[in-house]
Amino acid sequence: MSLYKTGRANYLFDVAAQEVDGTTRILRFGSAEDIGASFTPVATAKVYRTPTSAVTLEILSDNAADDVSGVGARSVRITGTDENWERQTDTVSLDGTTAVTVPGNWLRVCEMDVATAGTYGSFAATTQAGTITLRESGGGDTWCEIPIDGGFGIGSAEVGICSAPAGERIFVYSHRISVTSSDTACVVLFVREGSDNTSAPFSPVKAFSVQHDVSGHLPVNNSVIGPFTGPCDIGFMARATNTTADVDVTFEIIREVI
């Protein structure tokens, strides 16, 4: 039952409780430090790869303890789209600082998180020893990172962009932007539908929300943007308007199988 067709008063709660068939509510978040004057994806690695043909990937940590038998992260779950623009998820065992090949071919990666760990985590004990990096095979371009912050493992990639595969559509329900109070930034929600159109004329990347000179916290609640039908890419990019800026975004997505 679609978001814009249902009359259920508690629709969002029903979706969160998985009581609406084929529909999922997802909270996404992204973070990028020291963004400069050029528009940059709001993600820890400051990138979101969008190739027109699928590539193979590999994963590794900068700490040997992130290993299948180590005290840090033991395996990582990766979600994105395959060469046919269909949803793909794989869980890969880590080998410390040695790169491990990720199964399959990939066009997008929008989620990555620690799946299993060698330490029982607590507020004092991290289950991730180092920064975990997903990159193209052979030591190629970085695709995604699960960071360490103050010596503590975050456990999930901070990527303020996502992609819907073929057969799905997404709505952005609400979002929140945060910029270091001493800085200002222009933060834009961009959308590209028709991501599988890989020959000219291409489907455009265009803005659906533009916030100028943001400083501090800016909530944008109860504003439904969409629907956007997959394959599509949607997410936040930002540029500093005063030297550099640290930018964080949080947004909710309603994802429907169609």
Image: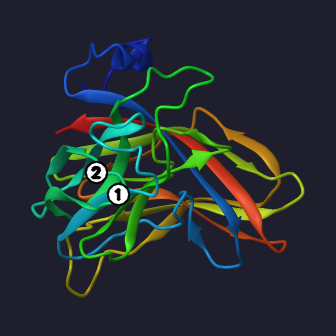
Which residue shows up at 55% across the image and 57% down it? Answer: 44
Residue at left offset 9%, top offset 61%: 84
Near-viewer residue (209 or 240): 240
The answer to whether one can see residue 3 in this image is no
In the displayed structure, does residue 150 sit left or right of residue 52?
right
Estimate the spatial distance between the alpha carbons at disc 1 and disc 2, rounded to whole Å. 7 Å
Q: Amino acid at mark 1?
A: Leu
Image marks 1 and 2: residues in contact by CB distance under 8 Å: yes
Q: What is the x, y in percent for residue 96?
A: 35, 52
Figure quadrant of residue 217: top right
Q: Is residue 14 above or below residue 237?
A: above
* Residue 95 disc label: 2
Element type at marker 2?
loop
For image coordinates 29% across by 81% down, the residue present is 202
- Residue 99, numbered circle: none
Q: Please state which amino acid type lies under the numbered disc 2.
A: Asp
Q: Nearer the viewer, residue 162 or 78?
A: 78
Quadrant position of the C terminus in the picture: top left
Which residue was labeled with disc 1? 60
- The residue furthest bottom is 200
> Is residue 130 in sight in this rendering?
yes
